[in-house]
Image: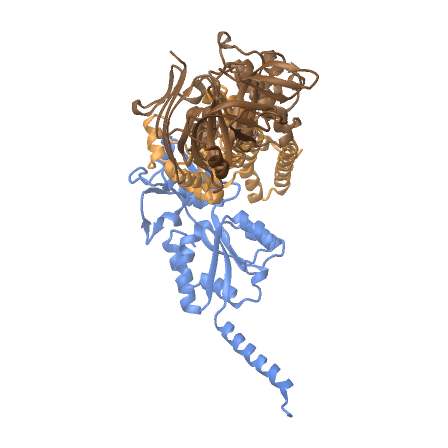
Amino acid sequence: MTSQINLRLQHSYSGFALDLDLQLPGKGVTALYGHSGSGKTTCLRCIAGLERASQAYVQINNEVWQDSQRGHFVPVHQRALGYIFQEASLFPHLSVRANLEFGLKRIARQQRRVDLAHATELLGISHLLERAPHNLSGGERQRVGIARALLTSPGLLLMDEPLAALDSQRKGEILPYLERLHAELDIPVLYVSHSQDEVARLADHIVLLSEGKVLASGTIGETLARLDLPLARGDDAGVVIEGKVCDYNLNYQLLTLQLPGSTQRLRVAHASMAIGQRLRVKVQARDISLSLTPAEHSSILNSLRVTVVSETAADNQAHVLIRLDADGTALLARITRYSRDQLGLCVGQTLWAQIKAVAVLA
Amino acid sequence: MNVPARPLIPNVLAALMGCFAFATAQADEVQVAVAANFTAPIQAIASDFEKDTGHKLIAAYGATGQFYTQIKNGAPFEVFLAADDATPEKLEKEGDIVPGSRFTYAIGTLALWSATDGYIDGTDKVLVGNQYKHLSIANPKAAPYGLAATQVLAKLGLTDKVKDKIVEGQNITQAYQFVSTGNAELGFVALSQIYKDGKVSEGSAWIVPETMHDPIRQDAVILKKGEHNPAAKALAEYLKGPKATAIIQSYGYHL
Amino acid sequence: MPLTSADFAAIWLTLQLASLTTVILLIVGTPIALWLAHTRSRLRGPIGAIVALPLVLPPTVIGFYLLLAMGPHGYVGQFTQYLGLGTLTFSFAGLVIGSVIYSMPFVVQPLQNAFTAIGPRPLEVAATLRANPWDTFFTVVLPLARPGFITAAILGFAHTVGEFGVVLMIGGNIPEKTRVVSVQIYDHVEALEYAQAHWLAGAMVVFSFLVLLALYSSRKAQTSWS
């Protein structure tokens, strides 16, 4: 039985209505993505039980936390979840250590899968243990808040825009810790954000919310490439690819990534990394040009063999959006209508995608 | 323009003031401090006083001791109707009154009263019987009726026996309140508080014989503040007159 | 020393009354303050107003209605008589009840303000960290509301020490049972015993000043911490 999160929520509040029916993977990071006011925070709070949705069915793996039809509602403090708020909300009357131990103390010894040393090392806060919360920077506080939630060994981590209250420098400091969490722990995460960058770096699965309704729910690779969603229309529309390092050229400082499920590779200028490590990159639609022949005599590093899947008009009348497939990896390209006609583009056609720039997400 | 404006304005003013003086000469107000036990009688006397003399009586009710303190500290009372003779005597000795204006306006009668009909049989039997939980008296340090009550209890040899049952009201009015609300089964009040038109108006009572306590002489004085107020003098005279004394006696006081 | 044993008895009685009243109010007032701070019910306004009534009602009004209610014909009096306790007027217990009513807003309001100032977030955080409501109250709410508790205790105590009107109406001035300091001072003035009145009243002024000084100094410490 695959682990899964089943959600059915209906909830009206302050001129707004939340109405969703979702099945989410029971592992990895699922992003709840949308503009402010799309209902993502309310959705998260309803899952946690901090707000009680009027009609709800919330099932996390094998536990039913709420079933409004049977009048069943598990109180928040009995749910095996960890919640990270936008503002760290550390207890001001306790030291950092006491804050961290607050949840840890309250779970039975045999349920503790994360210990203090592990959590403080993961978040890099070991040197802050004896400080008082008001003596920490915003970034440090948020890392303590994350560690504190982890120390309850939760079965599900809920993060409500944890980086939104931080400036970009702090954000940049914490993102690596979150990526590490993602890599080292197998606790599923629901991550609310309105930042494309965070979602691109962290999410395995993405739920697109708008005005309380689900527009899309799918893997990040698949969903970002969908032509029917507003995501594909943005100026920086593109796909996220998670490749495996298979080679590193010291001389030219070029990393070679193998595409999932394919022999095809991407090369990118980057610092050295160990073979076998995973790396996420973003390829923007405007950075892909299409050709009937593979690249030759050109400075373009990457040229992938792709098949045309579908096509749609772009916002700009002169352009079109093309969805491509590279052995299972989806790509988005934005080219002029003129070029499309010149190439005689049609569905199922085999082409070469010349990728001018690959952005490493790190 | 040669109009003599200057003599005109003072003349008009003088005429106006003359009218005022004439009007006030006709009807003055007198501020009176009245002992709590005399509340009902003075209200009856006040309306007759106003009808007969045109003067208005403005009364404040309270404890004699409290009034003494206020008078010593400049309270605007012009006539003082005390509940005892000691306090007016003290004021006289201290030169706070119009000399020679002190006189006894009433002699108080003590009554043992219960709000329950038939509880007291007109004698001291229930009092001596000591079957009650609370006996209400006015504070003996501050109210002469309270002092008289302790004297009665001493005379009956009850002082130690009822010591734990005594509850003190700050003044005779409060002593009455404790009994009227039923919180004390019985208590020593001023006869004037329960007596009207020659009989006890409700509940049951024992009218305490004068011989059982020092006489409660209630003296009145005209205070220095009222020295030049004709209404004050008029009130003092009125209190000695036949209409007032009749009212006072109807409330159970002697004279 | 111009203070008599009767005066000391009055002081001791007053301290007992104020302490007992404060303890009762802290216990009874805390759930009321919590409810007022967190509820969204429509009853919040009316209940808050009732709690605040003793702030505006003259104490003699409260005392008068207590006199009636506790007497043999009143609801409370009939109930206590039914329980075989007689009536509460003229008793220390009656004074405690009167003081609890009279000083309630002085305890409930600082507590309510403290709880409101904490806000809902710390409570939500505690719940996500596996603390049930009781646990959250003792480990999060109480420590964070401590300044409010101190203020409430000090104000409740000091206000009861100064109580006069209510005691006057229902006390009966019984030595060592209901004769509190404020009434004792009043008696001294009535009986023209001014020296004793000065001493007792002076002691009360000094006491009240020290209490308020303690309160305001501790407030300063609180604001620098937050």
Query: Which chain corresponds to the colour orange?
Result: C
Residue at the (60%, 17%) spot, across then down: A256
* Depth order, front residue of A341/A76: A341
Q: Colour of chain B?
A: blue
Residue A60 coordinates in the image, percent (x, y): 40, 18
- Which residue lies most toward the left here? B118
* Depth order, front residue of C165/A261: A261
Q: Please tell me in which quadrant of the rendered image residue B132 appears.
A: top left
Q: Colour of chain A?
A: brown
* Depth order, front residue of A158/A206: A206
- Which residue lies most toward the bottom here? B2
Colouring of the image: by chain
* Depth order, front residue of A297/A73: A297
- Residue A42 makes an appearance in the image: no
Quadrant of the rendering where the C terminus of chain B is positioned:
bottom left
Residue at the (36%, 33%) spot, across then down: C76
Q: Decide: is C207 above or below A145.
A: below
- Residue A53 makes an appearance in the image: yes
- Which residue lies most toward the top here? A110
Residue C139 coordinates in the image, percent (x, y): 53, 21
Q: Decide: is A301 above or below B234.
A: above
Residue B26 coordinates in the image, percent (x, y): 48, 73
